[in-house]
Image (cartoon, rainbow, N blue to C red):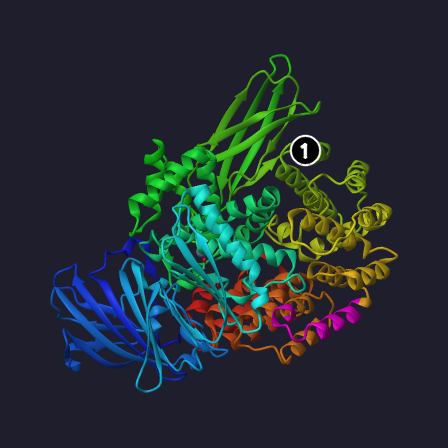
């Protein structure tokens, strides 16, 4: 935590098997706010003769320790800030340890904490060591029995992993509830929750006919907001059976929603803990996006039961083994539940913004990192989302059937084990009889490859020659790059609109040539579905891009072509900032057509009409021209609003509204209507449209769309509607988070006053990660104009917040610091201001490992 605690990073290369295993553990928690007593009885077996037993433990008060029932005198063990070491132990023995911890004081929300009158644990990655002494590493698996003792009047629900085996009244008036989890698991999957909840129950019959009790715990009074999550859980359970033949394994599955949580959710065996933001929803308070996220995260945590829990990671460097794979699985689930095209578009947007940025910055790392100081810093978009892209490439290469065969072999071969990414690839390889040697490089090589594609057509011989080359630039700490195996899924599209079949080009070398024969006219090469996490460079002319956008069979490719189109256009505008760019007539024609007659997929239409955002454009530059990007975006949007005013209005009015429902069709219609609104807000009748939209909205998606459009168009009616919104929802903290985020994203100069004001709001608390992220996450990530102010005010504001937060919750502080790390991407005053802030942070005498690692990597 502080300067005097040793900062030692670990390396993948230094992995050693555990010296001791603990097949069984029995835990008793006597819950109390400031002194919770944890008593552990472990059965220990030696693996390495003569090795000392080294247990991890932090911020624990050691009370008692006994080996085979005999209390150990102090000279038999050694206590450090991070370990309990016993030098001399037998080959097989029992160890009893009693420790005391202070959950009320635990604002880091790691380990066992008490917040909002709920006791809750978060152990991944290394929080268990803040609960008791134990080998806190994922390759030590134990069968857990957990007893919880508390006053049932205060804590009517006392939950832990597995099945409930007993409830007893104790002589002192307290209640003891006991749980047993028959599946051996690493301690990061341990969970305990105690509090007063409303419990929603349901059940699920598995494909083999077993009955599973489903329980969802929410804050009392919020029951009506739990139905969607419960239904989503059942859909996820069925989907995993149908798609992968994977069935749930315990008799009970519990999900608890809490308001104080560091991330989205946690897949503890049989007892998921969720951020309430990803559980609670009803038609008045949730946006379409909220509903989507709930289903996807409920799915994600459920899917971990096999990919993560039944087969877990050998060490934390292998995190992508479970996270990349499980993100891939949740993406496939969402694609099947809704629009596959939209899902792909959203996943690719994330890669092209946050992941490309990470690869280009000081925290660049391969999906399997090789060195880590603070593991919590590596729950990244690279490990998760690039990791999922790597899994997706395997599916593209092996086909769905081959991929499924590989996954089945992996799970069957390693059930109950803690394994590596290499084990996963080996299973894919063995099940399909292919050589994936070169493919493994994706696990060790960081950086975003650039793939350049050139085509030469010969009409006489009807042949097409496609030359492809790849290059990966050096990344932080990794200078030399090798050629990767890159699957490029393409389609040839001709002017006469004859479309031929798909081709899969598998690139293995730096430069390769692919020949096509029988190509009757010169085609355009369409890259489909972002089949590899690369930057593709193709020398398109604007008309060719419009042809793809208008005619390609693949919806994703149509969107992608428009993205390239817009980017090229904006680049031209940026190159000559003084002159207002003339928008090509062909563009206006095709846009008019889409607005007059939206495609059957209205959500895709909305995306075709959507300009790339600031973050996507920024990633296309080494040195980010902040002002030019922002002013060009504004200028082009304004032009589109004016030139197509009648078309936006016509399309907007043609979409009939109906009472709110969360269905794919209705979501798509709202998306297109709200896209039109964002342009109408910039027109002469902006205020009129916004006001009408805001007042007629019967759902959160439309209300927020009206507010956001008014804000971006700088309409004065924004203040009035925002105030109305805040008043209406003042009792609902999750809706107020949306309000906080909206206010923090205000591009106006007075946003700094709003930020200060928001932190004095009765609902705001520095200790609640949701509140802090709503305000300062939105400010630093969704308000580029004010955050990147030339005078550095935005950077200073964030730095002050990070300093405050580091003392409260290092994980939240370290997440917020990310936008400050990229100083090398900026020029002039911005670069100086960023460096100054980083230096100021680095100079702090007490800095968490979380911040220390990121800041020192970033500083020159
Ligand atoms: N496995 C957790 C994330 C834990 C983050 C620890 N800092 C949620 C998930 O990915 O499913
Ligand atoms: Zn996960």
Residue 7: give x, y in percent of width and height.
Answer: 35, 69
Q: State which image quarter holds ligand 2.
A: bottom left
Can you say which quadrant of the picture contains the N terminus? Answer: bottom left
Residue 391: give x, y in percent of width and height.
Answer: 44, 43
Q: Viewer-proximal residue, 670 or 4?
A: 670
Tell me the magenta residue range: 718-736
Tell me if 531 is positioned left or right of 637 in this view: left
Chief secondary structure of the magenta span? Answer: helix
Judged from this view, the residue extending furthest toward the top is 460
Residue 139 vertical position relative to residue 36 in the rendered view, above or below: above
Secondary structure of residue under mark 1: helix
Tell me if 37 is positioned left or right of 473 in this view: left
Count of marks placed on residues: 1
Identified at 65% across, 78% down, the residue is 756
Residue carrying label 1 = 548
Q: Is residue 229 visible?
A: yes
């Amino acid at each position: 935590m502080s300067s005097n605690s040793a900062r030692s990073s670990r390396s993948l290369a230094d992995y050693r098997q555990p010296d001791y295993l603990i097949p069984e553990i029995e835990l008793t928690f006597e819950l109390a706010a400031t002194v919770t007593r944890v008593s552990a009885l472990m059965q220990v077996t030696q693996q390495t003769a003569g090795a000392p037993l080294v247990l991890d433990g932090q911020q624990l008060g050691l009370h008692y320790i006994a080996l085979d029932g005999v209390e150990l005198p102090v000279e038999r063990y050694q206590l450090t800030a991070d370990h309990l070491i016993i030098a001399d132990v037998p080959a097989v023995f029992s160890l009893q340890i009693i420790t005391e911890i202070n959950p009320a004081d635990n604002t880091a929300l790691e380990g066992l904490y008490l917040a909002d009158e709920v006791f809750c644990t978060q152990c991944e990655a290394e929080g268990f060591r803040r609960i008791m002494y134990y080998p806190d590493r994922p390759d030590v698996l134990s069968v857990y029995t957990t007893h919880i003792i508390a006053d049932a009047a205060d804590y009517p629900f006392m939950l832990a992993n597995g099945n409930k085996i007993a409830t007893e009244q104790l002589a002192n008036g307290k209640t003891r509830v006991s749980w047993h989890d028959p599946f051996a698991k690493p301690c990061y999957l341990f969970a305990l929750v105690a509090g007063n909840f409303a419990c929603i129950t349901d059940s699920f019959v598995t494909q083999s006919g077993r009955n599973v009790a489903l329980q969802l715990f929410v804050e009392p009074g919020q029951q009506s907001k739990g139905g969607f999550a419960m239904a989503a859980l059942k859909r996820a359970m069925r989907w995993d059976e149908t798609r992968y033949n994977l069935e749930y394994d315990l008799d009970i599955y519990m999900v608890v929603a809490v308001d104080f949580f560091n991330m989205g959710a946690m897949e503890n065996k049989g007892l998921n803990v969720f951020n309430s933001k990803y559980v609670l929803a009803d038609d008045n308070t949730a946006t379409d996006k909220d509903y989507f996220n709930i289903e996807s995260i409920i799915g994600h945590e459920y899917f971990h039961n096999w990919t993560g829990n039944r087969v877990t990671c050998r060490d934390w460097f292998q995190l992508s083994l479970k996270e990349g794979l499980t993100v891939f699985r949740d993406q496939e689930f969402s694609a099947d539940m809704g629009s596959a095209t939209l899902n792909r578009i959203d996943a690719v947007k994330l890669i092209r913004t946050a992941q490309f940025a990470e690869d280009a910055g000081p925290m660049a790392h391969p999906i399997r990192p090789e060195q880590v100081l603070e593991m919590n810093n590596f729950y990244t978009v690279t490990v998760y989302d690039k990791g999922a892209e790597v899994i997706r490439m395997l599916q593209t290469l092996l086909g769905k059937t081959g991929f499924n065969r590989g996954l089945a072999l992996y799970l069957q071969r390693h059930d109950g084990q803690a394994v590596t990414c290499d084990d996963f690839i080996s299973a894919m390889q063995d099940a399909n009889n292919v050589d994936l040697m070169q493919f493994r490089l994706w696990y060790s090589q960081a950086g975003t490859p650039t793939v350049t594609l050139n085509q030469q057509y010969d009409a006489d011989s009807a042949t097409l020659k496609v030359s492809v080359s790849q290059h990966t630039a050096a990344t932080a700490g990794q200078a030399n790059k090798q050629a990767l195996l890159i699957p490029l899924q393409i389609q040839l599209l001709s002017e006469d609109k004859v479309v031929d079949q798909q081709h899969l080009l598998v690139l293995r070398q730096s430069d390769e040539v692919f020949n096509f024969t029988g190509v009757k006219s010169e085609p355009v090469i369409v890259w489909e579905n972002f089949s590899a996490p690369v930057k593709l460079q193709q020398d398109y002319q604007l008309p060719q891009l419009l042809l793809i956008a208008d005619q390609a069979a693949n919806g994703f490719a149509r969107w992608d072509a428009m993205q390239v189109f817009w980017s090229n256009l904006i680049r031209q505008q940026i190159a000559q900032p003084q002159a207002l760019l003339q928008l090509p007539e062909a563009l206006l024609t095709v846009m008019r057509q889409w607005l007059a007659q939206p495609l059957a997929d209205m959500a895709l239409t909305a995306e075709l009409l959507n300009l790339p955002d600031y973050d996507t454009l920024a990633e296309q530059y080494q040195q980010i021209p902040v002002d030019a990007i922002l002013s060009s975006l504004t200028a082009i949007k304004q032009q589109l609003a004016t030139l197509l005013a009648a078309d936006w209005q016509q399309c907007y009015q043609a979409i009939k509204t109906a009472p709110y429902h969360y269905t794919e069709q209705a979501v798509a219609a709202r998306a297109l209507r709200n896209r039109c609104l964002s342009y109408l807000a910039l027109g002469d009748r902006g205020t009129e449209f916004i006001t009408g939209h805001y007042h007629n909205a019967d759902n959160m998606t439309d209300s927020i769309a009206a507010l956001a459009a008014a804000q971006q168009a700088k309409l004065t009616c924004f203040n009035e509607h925002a105030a109305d919104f805040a008043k209406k929802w003042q009792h609902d903290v999750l809706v107020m988070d949306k309000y906080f985020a909206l206010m923090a994203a205000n591009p106006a100069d007075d946003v700094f006053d709003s930020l200060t004001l928001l932190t004095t709001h009765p609902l705001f608390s520095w200790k609640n990660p949701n509140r802090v992220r709503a305000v300062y996450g939105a400010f630093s990530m969704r308000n580029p104009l004010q955050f990147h102010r030339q005078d550095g005010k935005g950077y200073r504001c964030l730095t002050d917040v990070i300093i405050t937060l580091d003392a409260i919750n290092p994980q939240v502080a370290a997440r917020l610091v990310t936008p400050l790390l990229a100083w090398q991407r900026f020029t002039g005053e911005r670069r100086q201001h960023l460096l100054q802030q980083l230096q100021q942070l680095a100079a702090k005498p007490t800095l968490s490992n979380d911040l220390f690692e990121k800041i020192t990597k970033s500083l020159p």
